[in-house]
């Protein structure tokens, strides 16, 4: 009779947590300490236990893997997106785990230019994930972020697409939202707090130290997170604070990255609205007194 392995048991280390005046005890809060050798040892023990318990299913696992891979078109390409004079797309190759990001100039028949090969970036790491991929308005620079620990804290870097060289800029601990200003020298990015809530937006100027980056927005309400997008005409950078039922948006002229951040409308519980822009007018999709939403238009000057 086969003896089953003994499952590892995490140590109980009570920690009091106080939120909104309510106190609770988390016996396993210490497991959040990713660099703690005791945490790493415990996770290694969990992995060994899982492998031992699942060992008898390995032939089935291999069979299922081969069956699923056989149903996937490994060598594939996304539909191209035209931006300016370039067509951007990504593709995958059989046997490669990650995407290859490319573009062609002027025509889909033009020679391919590889902007970023995730397989190369991941070659010397045990874990790799690409965060953001953002080409500058003049299409000469590429801002992208990577996570090599699995902790979802990304390092933002910039590549010169003309020379292929990496700029000296490196911004640690960013999250999933990055936008270029129209000067091609300024990047806006978000950061998360200790609970991984996106709560701050910073401004970075190329060639400067990330420690000198300017905080342009802070969301103190723990029920809200923040992200950014550019309007479809690239005229404005929009910062959205959102909860499950409510949104609030600020906007900034993308031509003046150090300009004033303006509030579109103050948040109101249950009210959601979303901003876009075209030819001097804001188009606002809102659920205010509209169960299935309504579209409103107003001049930017208003």
Image (tube, rainbow, N blue to C red):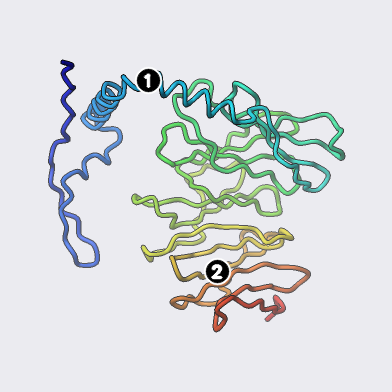
Quarter containing the C terminus: bottom right
User: Compared with residue 8, is residue 171 higher up or lower down, i.e. above or below?
Assistant: below
- As displayed, is residue 120 above or below residue 155? above
Viewer-side residue, 59 vs 111: 59
Question: Which residue in the rendered view is the most extreme toward the top?
Answer: 1
The kind of secondary structure element at disc 2 is: strand
Place residue 42 in its image quadrant.
top left
- Which tag is nearer the camera, tag 1 or tag 2? 1
Q: In the figure, is residue 142 to the left or right of 53?
A: right
> Quarter holding the N terminus?
top left
Residue 160 image point, x, y percent: 69, 34
- The picture places residue 187, in percent across and down from the top left corner, at 60, 49
* Residue annotated with mark 1: 58
**Could you say where residue 253 lies in the image, as x and y percent from the top left?**
67, 64
Question: In this view, which residue lies farthest toward the bottom?
Answer: 289
Which of pointers 1 and 2 lies earlier in the amino acid sequence?
1
Disc 1 crowd rating (10 Å Cα; few below 14, some 14-19, many 20+) is few
How far apart, in angstroms, are the residues tagged by discs 1 and 2?
A: 51 Å
Asked whether, in this view, residue 5 is left or right of residue 131, the answer is left
170 to the left or right of 78: left
Q: Secondary structure at mark 1?
A: helix
The residue drawn where x is 60% and y is 63% is 238
Query: Looking at the image, which residue is at 55% across and 79% down?
Result: 291
The label number, if any, that marks residue 293 in the structure image: none
Disc tally is 2
Specify the quadrant of the image occupied by residue 8: top left
Instruction: Name the one closer to the observer, 100 or 224.
Output: 100
Task: Point out which mark residue 249 bears.
Answer: 2
Q: Nearer the viewer, residue 187 or 77?
A: 77
- Local crowd size for mark 2, using a 10 Å CA cut-off: few (<14), some (14–19), many (≥20): many
């Amino acid at each position: 009779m086969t003896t089953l392995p003994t499952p590892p048991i995490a140590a109980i280390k009570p920690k009091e947590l106080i939120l909104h005046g309510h106190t609770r005890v988390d016996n396993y809060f210490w497991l959040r300490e990713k660099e703690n050798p005791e945490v790493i040892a415990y996770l290694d023990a969990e992995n060994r236990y899982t492998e031992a318990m699942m060992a008898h299913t390995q032939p089935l696992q291999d069979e299922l893997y081969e069956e699923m891979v056989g149903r996937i078109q490994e060598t594939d390409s996304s539909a191209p997106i035209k931006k300016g004079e370039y067509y951007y797309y990504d593709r995958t190759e059989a046997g490669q785990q990650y995407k290859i990001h490319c573009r062609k100039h002027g025509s889909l028949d033009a020679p391919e230019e590889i902007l970023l090969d995730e397989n190369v970036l991941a070659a010397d790491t045990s874990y790799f994930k690409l965060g953001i991929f953002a080409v500058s308005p003049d299409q000469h620079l590429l801002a992208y972020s990577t996570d090599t620990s699995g902790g979802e804290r990304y390092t933002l870097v910039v590549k010169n697409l003309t020379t292929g060289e990496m700029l000296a800029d490196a911004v640690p601990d960013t999250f999933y939202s990055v936008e270029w200003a129209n000067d091609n020298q300024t990047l806006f990015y978000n950061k998360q707090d200790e609970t991984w809530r996106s709560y701050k937006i910073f401004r970075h100027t190329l060639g400067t130290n990330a420690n000198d980056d300017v905080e342009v927005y802070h969301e103190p309400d723990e029920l809200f997170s923040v992200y950014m997008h550019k309007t479809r005409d690239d005229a404005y950078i929009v910062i959205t604070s959102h909860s499950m039922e409510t949104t609030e948006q600020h906007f900034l002229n993308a031509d003046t990255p150090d300009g004033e951040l303006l509030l579109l409308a103050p948040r109101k519980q249950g009210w959601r609205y979303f901003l876009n822009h075209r030819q001097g007018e804001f188009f606002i999709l809102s659920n205010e007194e509209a169960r299935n939403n309504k579209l409103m238009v107003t001049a930017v000057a208003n």
